[in-house]
C-alpha cells in the first residue's frame, strides 16, 4: 500500500510517500480500515517534530480516520467487512496513524458511521468534535438557554463547539476574524465578535446580559484573566490549550468573587472515546454538525498540509484523502 512516512524528526519535508509498504494485519480487537480520509491536526505535527514521542520510526501520522472496514481481527464483535466507521486517538497509543491507504485501528476508539454522514467530514471530525463535546457536554455540563463563549469560532475545535452548543440550545457567543463572521453565524452562533476589538470584554458582557455561564478557551495564556472577567456567577471555564505553558491571573479575585470553576483537559484522557464519538456521529447524521473542509490534500501533499495547519488562516479543517 501507499503510506506517508517519516524516518527522522524534523520539518514538513521529512514526510514522504512510500509505495510498497506492507498492508497491516488486524490483531485481536482490531479492525483493518480502508482509509477514506485522515484529518490534519496540530498534534500530528508534534509527533513529526519530536515534541511528542510517536509509537516508533518509521512512523505514519494521522490521529483521526474514517473509512470502510476491510477485515476484522480475532475477538471483534459488532463490526464486519464493509461497515463505515470513524474514530480518533491513534498514532500515540501503539498504533501507526491514518495517512495511508489502510490502517489498523482498535475497536475501543472506533464507532459506526450512520449512512447519512459524510465519510470525509467524519475523517476530519475526531479530535476537534470530541474535544468540543467533552468540553461542553461532559466537563461544563452546558444546559439549554445558558450563555457560552467559544474563543476562536472559526477554528477546528471552535467551529465544532459552536454547532454542538447550538444543538444543546445554548446561546452561543464566539470570536473570529471579520472575514469569517457570516460563516460562523451560519453555523449557529448568536453573536460573533472580532477578537481584535479593544472593548471585547464589554461586548461579551453586553451580548450575554452581564456574563457567560460557560467558556471554552483554546489559548489560556491570552484569555485566562479575560475568562474570569466576563464570567457570570458560578461560571465554568474549560481550557483545552495554550501557546505558552505558563498562563496566569493578573487578578484572581475576579474568579473567586464569582465562584468560577476551571477544568483543564486533553481529549486523549477521555475514559471511553466511543461515548463522545457516538454523539458526534448522531449530530453528523442529523445535519446538526457539519465539519467545514477548508482544503483537501492527497498523500503526497501531507507535508504541505502540516505546514498549513500551523501557519495558515482558514475556517474549519484540513484533511488528507488517500
Image (spheres, helix red, strand yellow):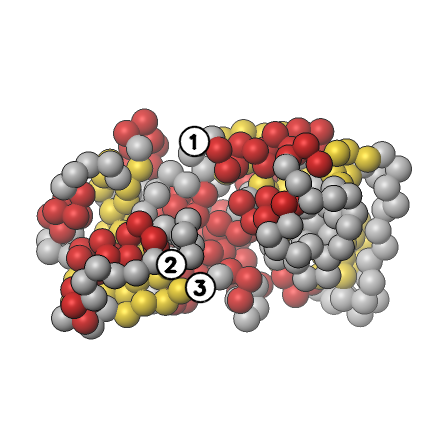
Q: Give the side of residue 8 with respect to residue 265, left or right.
A: right
Quadrant location of the N terminus in the rendered image: top right
The CA distance from mark 1 to mark 2 is: 25 Å
Q: Which residue is mark 3?
A: 265
Question: What x and y, as percent, mark residue 47?
Answer: 64, 50
Q: Residue at x 69, y 44 (%)?
A: 9
First in sequence, mark 1 or 2: give its number.
2
Q: Give the side of residue 181 with respect to residue 285, left or right.
A: left
Closer to us: 306 or 134: 306
Q: Residue at x 51, y 60 (%)?
A: 267
- Under circle 2, the secondary element is loop
The CA distance from mark 1 to mark 3 is: 25 Å
- Under circle 1, the secondary element is loop
Question: What x and y, as percent, mark residue 307?
Answer: 56, 33
Quadrant location of the C terminus in the rendered image: top right
Which label is found at residue 246?
A: 2
Count residues near mark 3 (Cα–Cα under 10 Å), then give few for <14, some for 14-19, many for 20+. some
The quarter of the displayed image where residue 193 is located: top left
Question: What x and y, as percent, mark residue 305?
Answer: 59, 33
Count residues near mark 2 (Cα–Cα under 10 Å), then give few for <14, some for 14-19, many for 20+. few
Which label is found at residue 313?
A: 1
Q: Residue at x 77, y 50 (%)?
A: 57
Q: Residue at x 65, y 45 (%)?
A: 48
First in sequence, mark 2 or 3: give its number.
2
Amino acid at each position: 500500500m501507499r503510506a506517508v512516512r517519516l524516518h527522522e524528526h524534523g520539518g514538513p519535508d521529512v514526510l514522504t510517500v512510500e509505495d510498497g509498504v506492507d498492508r497491516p494485519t488486524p490483531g485481536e480487537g482490531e479492525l483493518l480500515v480502508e482509509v477514506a480520509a485522515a484529518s490534519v491536526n496540530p498534534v500530528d505535527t508534534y509527533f513529526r517534530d519530536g515534541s511528542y514521542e510517536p509509537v516508533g520510526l518509521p512512523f505514519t501520522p494521522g490521529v483521526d480516520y474514517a473509512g470502510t472496514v476491510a477485515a476484522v481481527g480475532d475477538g471483534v464483535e459488532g463490526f464486519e467487512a464493509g461497515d463505515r466507521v470513524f474514530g480518533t486517538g491513534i498514532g500515540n497509543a501503539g498504533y501507526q496513524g491514518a495517512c495511508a491507504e489502510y490502517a489498523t485501528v482498535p475497536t475501543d476508539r472506533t464507532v459506526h458511521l450512520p449512512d447519512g454522514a459524510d465519510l470525509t467530514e467524519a475523517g476530519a471530525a475526531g479530535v476537534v468534535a470530541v474535544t468540543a463535546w467533552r468540553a461542553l457536554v461532559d466537563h461544563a455540563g452546558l444546559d439549554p438557554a445558558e450563555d457560552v463563549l467559544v474563543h476562536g469560532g472559526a477554528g477546528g475545535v471552535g467551529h465544532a463547539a459552536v454547532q454542538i452548543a447550538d444543538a444543546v440550545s445554548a446561546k452561543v457567543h464566539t470570536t473570529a476574524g471579520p472575514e469569517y463572521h457570516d460563516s460562523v453565524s451560519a453555523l449557529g452562533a448568536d453573536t460573533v465578535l472580532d477578537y481584535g476589538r479593544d472593548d471585547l470584554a464589554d461586548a461579551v458582557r453586553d451580548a450575554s446580559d452581564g456574563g457567560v455561564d460557560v467558556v471554552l478557551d483554546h489559548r489560556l495564556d491570552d484569555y485566562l484573566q479575560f475568562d474570569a472577567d466576563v464570567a457570570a456567577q458560578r461560571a465554568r471555564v474549560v481550557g483545552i490549550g495554550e501557546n505558552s505553558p505558563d498562563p496566569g491571573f493578573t487578578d484572581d479575585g475576579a474568579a473567586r468573587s464569582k465562584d468560577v470553576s476551571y477544568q483543564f483537559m486533553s481529549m486523549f484522557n477521555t475514559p471511553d472515546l466511543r461515548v463522545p464519538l457516538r454523539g458526534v456521529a448522531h449530530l453528523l447524521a442529523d445535519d446538526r454538525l457539519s465539519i467545514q473542509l477548508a482544503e483537501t490534500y492527497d498523500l503526497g501533499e501531507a507535508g504541505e498540509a502540516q505546514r498549513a495547519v500551523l501557519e495558515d488562516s482558514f475556517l474549519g479543517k484540513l484533511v488528507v484523502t488517500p
